[in-house]
Amino acid sequence: MMSNYGQVRRTVQTVFLALVLLGAFAWRANCERWCPFGGVEAMASYLAEGDMLCSLGTSNFFILGGVLGMTLLLRRAFCGYMCPIGTLSEGLHVLGRKAGLPQARVGGPLDRGLSLSKYVLLAVVLWLTWKAGELIFRGFDPCYALISRHGADITVWAYVVSAAIAAASLFVSLPFCRWFCPFAAVLNPFSRFGLTRVRRHADACRNCGNCAKRCPVAIPVDQLEQVHAARCLSCMNCLDACKVGPSRAISWGPPGRRGHAWSQAALILILLGCTSMAVSASYLIPVPSFVKSRGEKPARAAEAKIRLAEMTCRGRANLLVYFLERDDLYRVPGYLKVEAWPGPGISDLHVIYDPSATNEAAIKRALTEPYYDAVADSWRMSPFAIEGYDPFALLDEVTPADSPAPSGS
């Protein structure tokens, strides 16, 4: 029978999985903006170019920071308590075991060799993402298959990979999480230095080996005094399995004497605390997900805060910059810095400018007026609409006299 540690962990896993599913299907939220691996994928693009990959936001960086923080404290507890793929994979493994399917326990050199695959996969994903400027892994990501609501951008390969993981999980414990998950490759270097660890007390241990048998990632707990393995999930299955009793022969917590053991409640509080701080910070510190600048900032600058429709993604934000850098009658001279939060619906846009060279009205006209491209001899119609702004109400509105009128006017 599963003891209290396992029951509590299953409850926590179920709650987080339910939140993910509710967010994706009931609240129809963009769950990709809260994926910590999205922060890893977008890091290079944001640092080099100042913008996020489509579908992501700076919230990915905050949640990544929260997960790395909990990993430095709890090792890979995120994988053992919060990751929806880990939860489903574990559940399928339990189902396979109860159904009497043959179980393969992979350890030793084969386990170590397969574990290298995730580092190779991480390198490939990051390289291809950087080269393509988009989320390459999404087409194969089992997590995206779970949260995508099965829209047009999901590929058949995401379902194939998900089905393969599901089938393998019936026979092997956590195959994707142990060997192929690129986010696990990111977490492992931090987990290696995690504060907490499982400690085995040799004076009370009966050497029955049950702790090692129950470890889902094949750590030989019965042969160690302290578990320093980066792949440790802090799941506490080994504490459940101990016949002597937790805290006597085996315990979990920071380094120190036997009496320094922590409870599972402390682990859950740290998980919730790191997650809550990351989510709160993403709202309290509104870091733009798209930043572009032109020229040298003057001694005195002004800022136009605009609410804009149709700035749905990075591509549309780049189009916005194209309209601001136009060279016709509605050009905006002087210094410009664009800070934007692209997304569905109405998005925030901050334009910092030189007030001695232009003004907010000129910026709004540049964003909404058609742009005649003399090189291509064609008009570009603006897709943007500014909340509360009526361009026809401007008394000083003009149309370029030396350019053909836009079609349909």
Image (cartoon, rainbow, N blue to C red):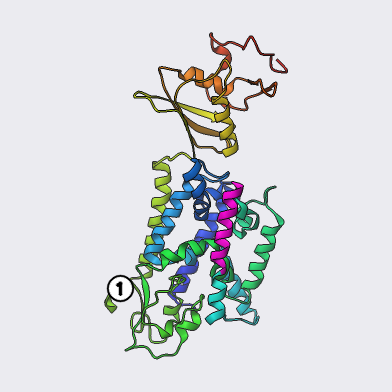
From the image, tell me which residue sits under label 1. Answer: 255
Q: Residue 88 lies in what quarter of the image?
A: bottom right
For label 1, the SS is loop
Judged left or right of residue 226, residue 141 is right
Q: Is residue 302 magenta?
A: no
Packing grade of label 1 (10 A; few <14, some 14-19, many >=20) is some
Please identify the residue farthest to the front as the structure is shown. Answer: 375
Above or below, 338 against 108 in this view is above
Quarter of the image where the C terminus is located = top right
Q: What residue type is disc 1 on?
A: Pro
- Please report the bounds of the magenta region as a residue range: 117-133
Say which of 16 and 303 sits in front.
303
Q: Residue 379 lies in what quarter of the image?
A: top right
Residue ID at (56%, 24%) = 367
Can residue 21 be spotted in the picture? no
Above or below, 79 against 259 in this view is above
Residue ID at (57%, 54%) = 127
Pinpoint residue 348: horizontal percent, then vertical percent: 49, 33
- Judged by its main secondary structure, the magenta piece is helix
Say which of 33 and 336 sits in front.
336
Q: Is residue 118 magenta?
A: yes
Q: Residue 238 lies in what quarter of the image?
A: bottom left
Residue ID at (61%, 48%) = 132
Judged left or right of residue 76, residue 201 is left
Pinpoint residue 2: horizontal percent, then vertical percent: 49, 77
Can residue 187 be spotted in the picture? yes
Above or below, 63 against 268 in this view is above
Above or below, 395 against 292 in this view is above
Pinpoint residue 136: horizontal percent, then vertical percent: 62, 52
Pinpoint residue 158: horizontal percent, then vertical percent: 66, 58
